[in-house]
Image (tube, grey):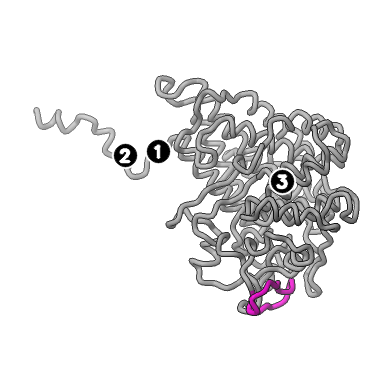
Amino acid sequence: MLVFFSCKKDIDTLNQDIKNPSSVPPGSLFTAAVKNLADNMTTPNVNVGIFRLLAQQWTETTYTDESNYDLNTRNIPQNFWNVMYRDVLNNLSEAARLVPAQDSLETSAATMRNQTAQIEIITVYTYMVLVDTYGNIPYSEALNIADVTPAYDDAQTIYLDLLRRLDAAIAMIDVNAGGFAENDLLLGDDMSQWVKFANSLKLRMGMQLADVDPAIAQTNLEAAAPYVLQSNNDNIMFRYLSAPPNTNPVWVNLVQSGRKDFVAANTLVDFMIANDDPRIPFYFTVDANNDYSGGENGSGNNYATYSKPNERLTDPSYPADLLDFSEVQFLLAEAVERGFNVGGTAEAHYDSAIIASIEFWGGTEAEALDYLSQPDVNYTTAPGNFKEKIGRQLWVALYNNGFEAWTQWRRLDAPTLVAPPDALSDIPLRYTYPVQEQNLNTTNYNNAVNAIGADNVSTRIFWDIY
């Protein structure tokens, strides 16, 4: 009998798989979501993100389909979409559900509010990217496992709701309390940095609205401006490790893979050479002639002939850049030009942006000032209107953020980029919707297509009106 009863004790736990727990802490899900987001935004893998090619920072060698805007052979729009919804937003949604279920004796109410705010900020960032990539997307009915055919929401309406959610997240943060602690691999659990990140994201999103709703744009930019990133020390960077599997996806695809698929694009290299840009040795290696040159977009380029991405960028621990001080300063320069009350002058913010970018990459302030003294770079004498002046230099500064380089080119229409002669289309202004949406969510897909006009790469995102 003693043996019988001793065996019966806790018999209900025998079927539990201790190596595969039925629930996980919200911090683990948050960490996974942030890493998946950083990977998806940074990878040069042609099956997922070809933004560096669309922005003409890099071009291809042997295989040139993606440089000629073939998005469908590799199902790129679907691959990118699935990571953002399945691996980022779904993890964030589950983390948000689990936050209030934590033991209140171990996790304070202030900490749980901060965790909720951190989740919301990354959620807003992710939905912003999805809208900027596709236009109308599933939003209000997304992430519901009981509804596998969610409706698509209007892109501009989503943006306005994201700004509301961002304001709520900012108001929720207690800088004197912690958040996800060691699970915050982005900002080291520094909640004051999360406030700066959220306000800088608000600045970016507000500027995206400037041409379609200037009043909303002005309200958000003026509210955010005092609280944005203040120096390169505040840059929002996801830092990778030197050993797999948590390594820089650029290293994974360019070094670990042993592949030789990319060289510098002549569009960016020629622009930098023409302006004697001191960042060029930090962006690219020298070519076969011990100089700098880029391959022709859309052509089969000999890998050995041209400059390649610099070894700094291909280091396994080199970080992903999600939002930085240089971009913030360019946005503030544009805000001043639009008459928004954000302080300073357009030229001062523009100069600060360029100096910050050059210093971040390894140049000196003296080199930055020399660069700014050139007639084609100096804000007073550079050709074009403020969008062209800012757009050209922002494009150069966003070298390690191909998605945002493509996005700001679409919004500012600068610099002038030309599609390769054999391209399947003009330079894409959006990704088309995934094939799976056409097949499995047909009615809502068709409604979305009718709402935006057409499901092709030339359909403009709502903020791209010029």
Q: Residues within 10 Å of mark 1 (few under 14, many from 20)?
A: few
Residue 327 - label: 3
Q: CA distance from mark 1 to mark 2?
A: 8 Å
Q: Amino acid at mark 2?
A: Gln
Q: Residue at x 54, y 72 (%)?
A: 259
The answer to whether residue 27 is magenta is no
Disc 3 vs disc 1: Cβ atoms closer than 8 Å? no
CA separation in Å, label 3 and label 1: 42 Å
Judged left or right of residue 365, residue 451 is: right
Question: Can you see residue 434?
Answer: no
Determine which residue is flagged by label 2: 16
Q: Pick out the residue farthest to the front.
A: 366
| Mark closer to the observer (2, 3) | 3
State whether residue 314 is above or below residue 453. Answer: below
* Residue 27 screen position, x and y as percent: 47, 36
Mark 3, Cα crowd under 10 Å, few <14 / some 14-19 / many 20+, is many
The answer to whether marks 2 and 3 mark residues whose Cβ atoms lie closer than 8 Å is: no
The residue at the point 61 percent across, 65 percent down is 309
In the rendered structure, which segment of residues is drawn in magenta? 287-302
In percent of width and height, residue 162 lies at 71, 34
Q: Earlier in the sequence, mark 3 or mark 1?
A: 1
Q: Secondary structure at mark 3?
A: helix
User: Looking at the picture, does residue 368 appear above or below residue 197?
Assistant: below
Residue positioned 53% across, 33% down in the render: 190
What amino acid is labelled 3 in the image? Answer: Glu
Q: Is label 1 in a helix, a strand or a loop? A: loop
Q: Nearer the viewer, mark 3 or mark 1?
A: 3
Q: 333 or 408: nearer the eye?
A: 333
Marks 1 & 2, CB-CB < 8 Å contact: yes
Q: Amino acid at mark 1?
A: Ser
Q: What residue is pinned by disc 1?
A: 22
